[in-house]
Image: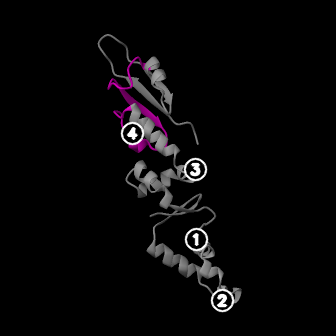
């Protein structure tokens, strides 16, 4: 993943010039105050440009503490969810909701379609594994895959299929 960074400028005051700088997330308070000559706790700055996956979560008036919290939340997601964040986030109301439900999301990285998911799900089921090979060969994986799709919430990505809660 590319470096996550943000461009911030200080708000103009009567006696000082406007300062601006790029910051890599998470933002250190000392570096922030040194470059912009304003406190992180003040409201004397605004976010101008954003280069990170969760841009929709951040407005120009977002605090640095909130920005750092969002960064840490994103970084604590499993690597596969980080990689497919753009495709998954539209099924959640926010990064925090995705993070809260991260352990309930099943990723089938080697599956390209619902037939593959059906086969994978069944291979992880002890009752299915107890069946003899002569019976398994008659199983309709495509039909079961369609059943799963009709009765679940699945998202296809370039890195496999996700089952969402």
For disc 3, the marked residue is: 79
- Say which quadrant the C terminus sits in: bottom left
Q: Residue at x 42, y 27 (%)?
A: 8
Q: Where in the figure is residue 112, as x and y percent of width and height? A: 60, 66
Relative height, residue 139 to residue 92 (above, below): below
Name of the residue lying farthest toward the top:
15
State how far apart marks 3 and 4 are (Cα). 22 Å
At label 1, counting other C-alpha atoms closer than 10 Å, the crowd grade (few under 14, some 14-19, many 20 or more) is: many
**Which mark sits nearer the N-terminus, 2 or 1?**
1
Mark 4 and mark 1 residues within 8 Å of each other at the beta carbon = no
State how far apart marks 2 and 4 are (Cα). 54 Å
Q: Any magenta on residue 37?
A: yes
Mark 4: secondary structure: loop
For disc 4, the marked residue is: 58
Please give left or right for residue 34 compared with residue 59 in the image. right
**Which mark sits nearer the N-terminus, 2 or 3?**
3
**Which mark sits nearer the N-terminus, 2 or 4?**
4
The one of 62 and 7 positioned closer to us in this rendering = 62
For disc 2, the marked residue is: 135
Mark 2: secondary structure: helix
**Which mark sits nearer the N-terminus, 3 or 1?**
3
State how far apart marks 2 and 3 are (Cα). 38 Å
Magenta segment: 36-63
């Amino acid at each position: 993943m590319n470096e996550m960074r943000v461009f911030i400028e200080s708000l103009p005051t009567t006696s000082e010039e406007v300062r601006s700088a790029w910051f890599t997330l998470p933002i250190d308070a000392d570096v922030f105050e040194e470059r912009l000559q304003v406190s992180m706790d003040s409201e004397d700055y605004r976010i101008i440009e954003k280069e990170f996956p969760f841009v929709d979560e951040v407005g120009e008036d977002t605090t640095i503490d909130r920005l750092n919290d969002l960064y840490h939340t994103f970084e604590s997601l499993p690597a596969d969810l980080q990689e497919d964040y753009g495709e998954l986030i539209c099924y959640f109301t926010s990064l925090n909701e995705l993070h809260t439900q991260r352990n309930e999301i099943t990723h089938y990285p080697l599956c390209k379609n619902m037939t593959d998911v059906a086969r994978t799900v069944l291979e992880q089921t002890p009752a299915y594994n107890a069946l003899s090979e002569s019976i398994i060969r008659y199983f309709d994986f495509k039909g079961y895959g369609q059943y799963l799709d009709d009765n679940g919430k699945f998202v296809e990505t370039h890195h496999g299929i996700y089952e969402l809660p």
